[in-house]
Image (cartoon, rainbow, N blue to C red):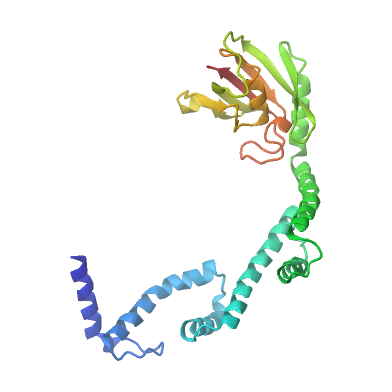
């Protein structure tokens, strides 16, 4: 049925080609000419949206856009010109990269920007092989310079969050029944994990290769619950301690909990998500978990 409808449309277009407008300098001599023209008109509105929304072309320069479109559609491919056009596309991407870098370095201050010419020069020297350092060395240098800037911006924005966590840990440590254990952080430092035994487990103690099934609830120090197995019909959560895909504080504390244990665990930001922004969990957040080891 679809094939019959399509053929009818083709025949209809062939019979009526003389009625089509010639304002776009179309050469409508045969039915297929009209069919081709009609397709262009039909697709033009989509192209108009793509031109403005995706390509960012100002409609004021529509004639220039059409001029380029004609050259691209009619002229034979010119490798030299193609290379130039592709270079224009990449140049626009480098421009956007410079804007993103400016935003990251200057923490959203739109009055300050990096020099896009320096970024461009780096690309060019790298492409031509005239750079004085290797790409790997350049990336290492970039990281060593950008990381302190990122850290400073995060401290500026979320420093109060870190201070609140430190204060909470200091006060919580004094509470009755709260115990501590020192854990080595990923950067070689040491952070103090705090826990309070709510139920003393009598089962087996997990090993480094155990799979542990738990129920848990996680909350921020202001009491906001951000995750809980109770929200998933109390479906137990499994952690493979051989390759734990959980925060370091979790991986370490589970090794201390015999089956049947239920603890309240307070995890400093160094053993949680650190400077990472996890949505509800902002950078430098101290986290509190109630964890029950089932088996």
Residue at the image position 55 percent from the left and 84 percent from the top = 78
Quadrant of the image containing the N terminus: bottom left
How many labels sit on residues?
0
Quadrant in the picture for residue 91 = bottom right
Query: Residue 197: where, in percent of width, then height?
Result: 65, 12
Give the side of residue 244 with respect to residue 122, left or right: left
Q: Is residue 280 above or below residue 200?
A: below
Residue 110 in view: no
Query: Residue 114: where, in percent of width, then height?
Result: 77, 63
Is 69 in front, or is 145? 145
Residue 34 in view: yes
Q: Is residue 169 above or below residue 8?
A: above
Is 70 in front, or is 186? 186
Residue at the image position 72 percent from the left and 35 percent from the top = 284
Query: Residue 142: where, in percent of width, then height?
Result: 77, 55
Quadrant in the picture for residue 68 = bottom right
Q: Is residue 189 above or below residue 196?
A: below
């Amino acid at each position: 049925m679809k094939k019959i409808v399509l053929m009818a449309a083709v025949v209809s277009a062939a019979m009526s080609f003389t009625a089509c407008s010639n304002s776009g300098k179309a050469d409508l001599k045969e039915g297929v000419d009209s069919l081709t023209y009609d397709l262009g008109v039909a697709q033009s509105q989509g192209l108009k949206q793509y031109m403005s929304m995706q390509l960012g072309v100002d409609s004021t320069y529509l004639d220039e856009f059409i001029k380029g479109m004609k050259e691209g559609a009619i002229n034979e491919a010119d490798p030299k010109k193609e290379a130039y056009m592709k270079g224009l596309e990449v140049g626009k991407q480098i421009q956007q990269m410079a804007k993103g870098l400016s935003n990251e370095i200057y923490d959203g201050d739109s009055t300050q920007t990096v020099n896009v010419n320096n970024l461009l020069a780096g690309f060019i020297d790298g492409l031509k092989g005239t750079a004085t350092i290797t790409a790997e060395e350049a990336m290492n240098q970039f990281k060593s310079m950008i990381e302190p800037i990122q850290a400073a911006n995060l401290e500026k924005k979320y420093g109060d969050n870190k201070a609140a966590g430190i204060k909470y840990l200091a006060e919580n440590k004094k509470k009755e029944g709260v115990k501590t254990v020192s854990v080595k952080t990923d950067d070689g430092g040491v952070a103090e994990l705090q826990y309070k035994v709510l139920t003393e487990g009598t089962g087996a103690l997990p090993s480094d290769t155990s799979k542990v099934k738990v129920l848990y609830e996680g909350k921020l120090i202001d009491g906001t619950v951000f995750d809980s197995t109770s929200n998933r019909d109390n479906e137990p959560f499994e952690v493979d301690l051989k390759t734990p895909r959980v925060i370091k504080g979790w991986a370490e504390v589970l090794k201390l909990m015999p089956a049947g244990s239920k603890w309240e665990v307070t995890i400093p930001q160094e053993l949680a998500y650190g400077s990472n922004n996890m949505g509800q969990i902002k950078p430098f957040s101290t986290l509190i978990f109630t964890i029950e080891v089932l088996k």
